[in-house]
Structures are given as C-alpha cells and as structure tokens.
Image (spheres, coloured by chain):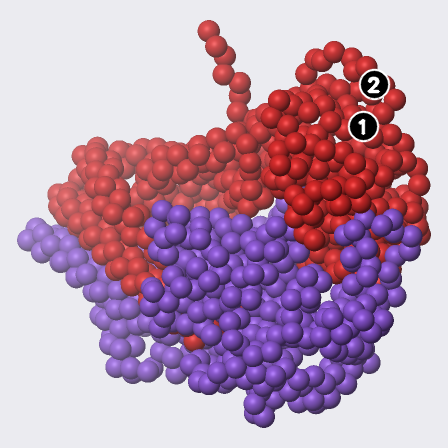
Chain colours: A purple, B red
Amino acid sequence: MNLLPIADAATTRRLTWRLLTRRPWAPAGVAALFVIAAACGLAAPALLGVIVSTVDSDGPAGTIVAAAVGILGAGALAAFLTAYAQAAMARLLQNALADLREDVFATTLRIPQASIERAGVGDVLSRVSGDVEAVGEAVSGVLPAFTSAAFTIILTVTGLGVIDWRFAVAAALAAPIQVLGLRWFLGKSGPMYRRVRIAEGERTGQLVEAFEGAGTITSLGRGERHSARVASASREAVELSMGATKVMARFWNRVNTAEFVGLASVLAVGYWLTSSGLAGIGMATAAALLFFRLFDPIGTVLAEFDELQKAFAGLSRLFGVLQHKGDPEVDGGWTGSAGRLEVRNVSFSYTPGRLVLDDVSLTVAPGERVAVVGASGSGKSTLAALIAGIHPPGEGRVLLDGEPVETGRAAASGVMLVTQEVRTFSGTVADNLRLASPKADDAALDAAVRAVGADWVGELSEGLATVVGEHGVALTGEQAQQLALARVALAGPRLAILDEATAETGARAAKRLDRATAEAVGGASALIIAHRLTQAAAADRVIVMEAGRIVESGAHDELTRAGGPYARLWEAWTRHARGTAVTSGGSGTG
Amino acid sequence: MVSHPRPSALRPLKPRLGKIALGSFALTSHQICEAMVPVAIGLTIDNGIVPRDPGGFATHIALLAGLFVVLSLSWRTGFTVLMRVSLEIGHDLRQTVTDRALRPGGLAGHRSAGESTVIATSDATRVSSLAWQVGVQVAALAAVATCTIALMRVSVVLGLIVLIASPLTLLFMHLLSRPLERRSEAEQEAAAAAGGLATEFVSGIRVVKGIGAETETARRYRLTSRDSLRAAVRAVRAKAAYDGVATTATAALTAGVALVAGLFALDDRIAIGQLVTVVGLAQFVQGPMTRLGAFGVELAQKRASVRRVDDYVNTPPAITPVEAPEPADKTSLLTVTRDDHGTWPDLRVGEGERVGVVFADQADAVSFVAALTRREALEGGRITVGGRDLATLTPDEARAGVHAQPRDARVLTDTVRDNLTLDGPLDEKALHAAAVEDVLAALPGGLDERLEGSGRTLSGGQRQRVLLARALHTPQPLLVLHDPTSALDAVTESHVAAGIAGLDGRGIVLVTTSPALLSSCDSVTARLDGEWTAATHAELFDSSASYRELVGA
C-alpha cells in the first residue's frame, strides 16, 4: 500500500483560506452579519436585568412593558439576521465545496493507474465519496450552528464585560477547565474513534463476507466459523465504543464542572458588587442569566468541535489528492486512420526482480489484426496495458506511427483499450456509449449498436434512452460486453486493444461476441488478447507469449504447420474438440 | 383470539429491562437537576444577594455545588449504562441476523448482501437505540413534571401560561418542519447521487482510462455536483429560516413570560429571584418538550427497523424437506429423473464415474446445480443422492452425500490453506490437478497468504483454480462442478482436464460446455434440439452439428 498524499495541517489551512477568500468580501460580510445577530441576542438578558432593576426600585410598569417588547423585537431581529447569515454562509461554503470536490474528482481521474493501484482503489474511493460526504455534512449540518454559537459566546462574554469587567473575569474562570477538558477529550477520543471506525469496518467486512458468501459458506459447512467471526468483530467494536462512551461521559462531567465554576463565580461577583454598592440587583441578575444562557452554545461548540476536526481531516485528504501530479488532461478527438504500432524492446516488472515482460518487440501494420496467445501469467494483459499507456514501460518504447504513446494519454493518440473488466455505468444506454464520443448523434449510436449485434437495445422500453445499471435495467455479461464493443465502434480508434474475456459467457455467446469484435474494430489496427483459440484463428497474425517473451509469431496456418508451441496448443484444443481421449495434459507452456 | 408473537427484534431488550430502568432513573435525576439550576440561581439571588446575607449566599452556593455533583454523576451513570445496553442489544441483533443468513437452506426470496448488511448494521443499531430513547423519554417527562411543579409553586397563572404556550409553540414548529424534512431528503439524495457517480467512475477507472473518457466523466460529475450544490443550499436556507422562526417564537414566549412575571414582581406577588426562576424555567422546559414531541417521529422510524429485522429473521427457508416414497436405486451416488419439460436429463452416476452434462440453456444449468446445493427448491423431476430422495433431506443431510460447486462459488477471506484444505490435510494431487501450484508460486506468502476481499487480488483464472482445488479437497463421494475452467486459458484448461481425469474414487459430474473437460468424461448427456441424448463426447461431436455448436467448436 502506498496511499495518496495527505496535505499537512498548515497546507490545509492555507488552501482552505484561499478557497474561501476567492471573493474576500463574502466571508467578511457573513462575519459582520453574525456579529450583529449575536449582539441582538444579548438584548434579552440585558432587558431582563432592566425589568429586575425596575422591580427592585419600584419603577413604572411602562418600563417593564417596553423591556418586554424590546425582548421580542431584539429576538426577532437576531433570529432574522442569524438565518440570513447562515444562508449566506451556506452559499459561500457550498460553492467552495462544490469547486473542491469537482477538482478532486477530475484530478483523481488523471492519477496514473499504477499510483491508484498502489494506493488501493479503496483509498481513492474513500476520498471522492467518504471524505467529500464528511466535509459536506460538516458544512451544511455542523458549521452553521457552530458559527452562531461561537459568535454568541464571544458577544456574551463581551456583554458581561460591558455590565462590569469583573463579571467577564468571573466567567472566564470556566475557560481553562473547558479548554483543558476539550484538549484531553480530543487527544483521547481521536485515536479511540479511529479504532472504533476500524473495528466497525472490520465488522462490516465480516458481515459482507458472510452475506455474500452465505451459499459457499454453508455448502462447506463453515457457518459457525463465520458466525463466530462476526461475533468477535462485533464484540470488539462494542468494547471500543464503550471505551469511547466512557471518555465522553468524563468529558461532559468536566464541562459541568466548568459550568458550576463559572456560574458560582459570576454569582459571587454579583454578591460582592451589589453588597459593596458597585452594582444593582438588576446587573447581577442580568450577568447570572447571561452566563446561564451560555450553557447551550458552549455545549454546541464543544460537541461539534470533534465533528469539525473530522471534517478537517477529510479536507486534508482532499487537498492531498490535489497535490498529486496527475497525467495531463486528455482532450480526445484524434485524427487519422489505422495506425502502425511498434513495440521496441520493452521490458516491465511490477516488483523489482520479477520481469513480467522481457525484451518484447512487435509490430502491428495499419489495419492488421494480431492475436496474442499465452497461458495466464505469460504477460499478455500487461503487454496490453503498456501499449494502452496505462503503465509506463520500464525499458523500451511504444510507438504509434513513429510517435511515442504517452502514459495516460494514449486515448489522445487514438488508442482504445477494452479491458477484461466489463462495466456499465448508471445512466442510459446512450450515456454509456457516449463516454468515449460525447458528440456522437443518435444515428451514430444506432449504427454502433447494430454493428455489434446488440439488437436487444431496440427492444428496451425506451431504446437508447433506457436507464441501465444499478438504478435501471440489469444487463447480462454478454450485453455489457456488447456495449463495451459498441463504444469502440462509435469512437473508431486508430488502434484497438481488446483484452476482453469472452470465455465466461458460454460458447454461443462467445461466437456472437467474436463477430461483434470484428465489426467493432472495423478497419482499425487491432491487438487482440486471445482468451480462446478461435479468436487467434480468426486473426491475421498470431503471437505466442511464454513467461514474458514472444516465442512465436506468424499467421495461424503457418504456425500450425511449424510444429512449435502454437501448433501443440492448437492440436490439443482440436483433439478435445474431436473427442480423442486425453492422455496427457498439455502443460509446460505456462 | 390470535396471539401475535412478540417481535424477534425486541427479544434482546427483555433480559435487560432492569438496566434500562436504572439508566432511565439516572437520566431522570439528571434532567431534574438541570431543571433545578435556574431555580437555584433564583434562590441564591433571593436569599443571598437581595438580602446581602453572606451566610445565606454561601449556603446556596454549596447547594448549587451539590446540585451539580448529582447532575454530573447521574448523567454519567445514565449515559454509560444505557449506551452499554444499546450496544449489547445491537450486538445480539446483528448475531441473530447473521445466524439466520448462515442457516443452511437459504432464505426464501432473494436478499442482496447489501440489504442484509443494512439490516445487520443500520437497522440493528436503530432498534438497539430504543433502550437509550426510553431513558431519554422518561427523563424528559420527569423534567416537564418538575418544571410544572416549580412554576406552579411560584405562580399558578405563570405556570399555566408556560405550560399551555410551550406545547402550542412546539406544535406550530412541528408543522413548519415538514417541508424542511423534504428539503433535507432532497439534499441527501442529491449528495448520494453525486457520491454514487463518483464511486462508480472511480471503481471503473480502468474502463474510463482505457477508452480515454476522463474529460467526459469529469463533465458528468460536475453536472451532478452542481445539482447537489443547489439542493444543499436550498436545504440550509430552509433550515436557517426554520431556526429563525423557532428563535422568534422562543423570544416571544420569553418576552410574554418576562412581561407578566415583571408586572407580578412589581406588585410583589412574586420575589425577584422567582422572576429569574420563571424566565429560566420557561426557557429550559422547551428542551424536554421538544424531545417528547420528537418521540413520535423517532418511534415511527424505529418501528420500520423493528419490522425489517423481524421480517429478515423470520424469513422461511428456501427449501423444506418433504415426505417422498423410498427410491428403488440405493447404490448409485446420484440419480436424476427428468421432469415433464425435460429441463434436466435422466442421469445415473456411480463411484469413480465422470459424467458430463451439457445444457442448452445456461439458466437451467444454474438451477440444476442450485438444487443440488440444496439452497433452492426442487421443482419437478426427482434427484436421489446416495440412495435417498433429495427432497426429503435437510441441507446438511444432502451435503453429506454431494458437494456441488456453483459457478458463482466464492473464495473466502482466509489464507489460501484455509480455503483449500478446509482444516483437512493438504492433498498434493488435488493441487496438481487444479493447476494451482502456479498460483501458489505467484503469491508472496504461498499457502499462508491471506486472500483479502474474497480473493479480489487474484485474477479470474487464479481464483477459479483455487476454487477447483478446494472442491477437489472436499470429502463427499460425489462432486458436481459447474464451468470450473471458464476463466482459464486453453493451455491450463487442458492440464486441468487431464488432472481431473486422473483422479480416482469419487464420482464427478461436470456441468460445462468445455470440450476439454467433456472429452475427459466417461459419458456426456447433452440437450440437443430439445431432446436429451447420452453418448461419449467423441460420438456426440461427430454425429451432431447442434452439439458442436453448443461446445463452441
């Protein structure tokens, strides 16, 4: 594993700041709104103080009525301003977030395949979905309340100071307990929550294993074993969650202690100031009520701090992706017809010392169809990946019409690879086909679909506009492969590399797909990684690979007469087909 | 009268009722203490600050300290006890769901792994949090009662104002919150759509890169991302507006109470400290009242989860053994008698025999093998295994006589050794026959390599050879394999065909269209133009064009 980079805290803060201040007046305006809103919120306890002192001094009832009206008016104004500020902040932050996630996604797609495989698709996926989600939830769920609460706290403490600076000092006595408590909590809870998440991930893994493999597990009589595994993973998660619960309980106890210390100090200052005639009962009351009203916002800030910290971690992983140097953008739209492929002395290894390709050279003439035959592990698929620019060759060169095929930019020169992995993406049939040729019109789509024999598209309820994939019509393996081939037919590449495994779909379907492949390739040059010998027999030329080397090359008829490895393979295959008893396995070529 | 069985999902609550009661009591005590804080502030002002009595002030601060001690301890007890109970209940439910899924005989009606996982995690957690909810509700009720008593003691009129106005405000807010829920759902859906698209494209990144669709893919993601942005802004705006109205309503209530209480205090009907108490309580009581009001919605969500867990746990098995007359043939390892539609052939397999079966329709092949695994019901026809009618057997009984490996058999997330030997000894001959030695050589850890994610790191061909080697390690006298070499190249396939042919002893049924495997069988039964025909592979190959087409030559 070699995870994608993660931005450090300073970089994350810097980049976040830059993202937010693209339009600097916007955050300033939002902050101003919050300040005014919080100031209005202070009016209520202050006016209650007025009511108390009016009562204390037997003042006129009119003052009390005026104060009550004031409480209502200030409350309504505060509410309106807060709502407006929160909405403005949401627009600001959501826009920044959308920009960020789109940048991250676009960059992710340009990360070289090799880096993605080293990092694990899981790491990449967790960033474009999990981290984006975590940051999004923090921005729309936690941040508005957090910001309001933070401004309320700041303004309330200021308000206490305005009544008398000694009240603010008294209230501030709670702060060290809160800060230390929070630091203690974050220090403990961070690693604890991480362990809980890992344990829950393990638990989910065991559950998925049990549910997906239920048939296999019961057929092997291993039900109890897997039940016990789920139990122990679940038990582990329970105990770790319980540990986190205890830490949280102790944290809130500390928060309560801070509340008491602050409240008692404010009351004591009130007692002292009133008894020494420095303040009236109304001021003491207002101060006590102001502090009491802080309980909730302080709770909010302390509780959500944790969430914000998690979001910050997600943010640093997103910025980390942006630090990755991706392949240059592929603009598509090549010109020219069938190309001439030259592979010159290419060697390649995934791990040092284990050559997967060993000094491979080959040529595909314009319009020629070359099949590569070999046992699994002989290097066929790696050769395909190298030519398609998925991996850079360790040594040697890959040239198309004399121009090197750039890693990650093969499509720009008209090289198209159909992988063994067949995939339909959620969306319509047309969406799926247009991935490689966004500008193709419906007539072109129809032609491509007919060329590969996917007549079933016409029978779908809405034809090309039918939604397929996870949220629509489920396609069979054969249908999905036809769509993959139709993409090739539509794009009309200069060199098509076909590494699709037709074997899993049964003999008849395989034949249909062989025909579809021929149609899809059309006049392009083609390198076909043959998973069945019939594919080789239909090609213009056959290349046989063994242990990363090319051991034979020539037309099918030529090779069958030559008596080499291909002839032995072909003979073994046709012997099965004719039904002669097998006496010895044709091993030794893998 | 029909008695309804107690829902299975609630069963784990029963033995823990005592602990739930303890936790609820502790939370109640915490809520009462919380309600008493404004009362204590008022008392301190009335008896300490207003009369300037140092003794009274000190006594009341001490009382306040005592209040906070009880408040802290009861919160801690209630929180930890109820969390522990919730986690334990969730654990039990998860186990019940898992055991149901792993019971031989399967589940009637298809359940996807994703759906099962959601039931075992989200739904189980939601049901288990009922314990916590009970505590919170009891405590909220107690808090409202405490506030009522405290307010009534100060002034009946003020008490009535607070107790009537608060629920009305809450009801109003509840009605207002409906459109808010819709907005928030729309936001979540849009976010999920964008996340889903990103997940799909990144998981299929090989395909995307292979066809050079990076730019187009990014463009499509941008479109859904902008949808998500618009939905999120709308949702936050609605939430902000709602909060604004809620804050205004609270301000109105506070202003009203302050006005009345202030006028009462001016008339000396209540003391200044009591004025503070009333205003404080009026603010505080809205918390527990909101929790009481939200209980209905939460209960509805939990009811849905209870039902889903119940449905799952009580799903009948896909197969149930039935009575059937004793079969005549007691010696064959397997006999199959065809049904009226000829979906299956007539078959008889004895010790050491190799029989190939070629289905014209792959769906029939799949259901034939599924019936033999005894996870799907038999329909028509008759199968006997080891002289006993399959329909009369439980899955475990059936498994004693036959191991059937369907096409979608899975590598388990275990070491290679665990996968292959199933705790038995390693069989070198089986390893060689399945051509799995190459696979072992390619793995850094060899036999002790752990195959993560159900062998996701293996290629299709490697995975298939591991599965074949595992099947060859099973002890049953009869082995049924479905397309065991479909992902292998021609070279390896012919090696495997020879390897299987060279094994002795057990009967093997090969459901396949591979000529390499079929030519190694003693006899082959194929469905040709609607009729089942039995002969050797060579005879069928020479005599029937349909057969040649079926086996892909």
Left or right, residue A578 beside residue B245 = right
**At label 1, which amino acid type do we have?**
Arg
Q: Residue furthest front?
A: B543
Residue in front for this viewpoint, B231 or A510: A510
* Residue at position x 16%, y 46% in the image: B256
Is residue B25 in sight in this rendering? Answer: no
Mark number displayed over residue A13: none
Q: Quadrant of residue B191?
A: bottom left
Q: Is residue B466 above or below residue A159?
A: above
Q: Where does residue A211 sit, x and y in percent of width and height?
A: 63, 42
Locate residue A339 relative to residue A298 in the image: left or right.
Answer: right
Look at mark 1 in the image and give the residue it sits on: B348
Furthest toward the top, the residue is: B1
Name the residue nearer the viewer: B352 or B550: B550
In the depicted view, which residue is nearer to us: B475 or A522?
A522
Residue A446 visible in this rendered orientation of the protein: yes
Describe residue B302's horizontal placement relative to residue B534 as left or right.
Answer: left
Q: Say if mark 1 contacts mark 2, CB within 8 Å.
A: yes
The residue that disc 2 covers is: B329
CA gap between label 1 and label 2 equals: 10 Å
Residue A460's x, y, as percent?
Answer: 39, 48
| Helix, strand or loop for disc 2 | loop
User: Which chain hosts label 1?
Assistant: B
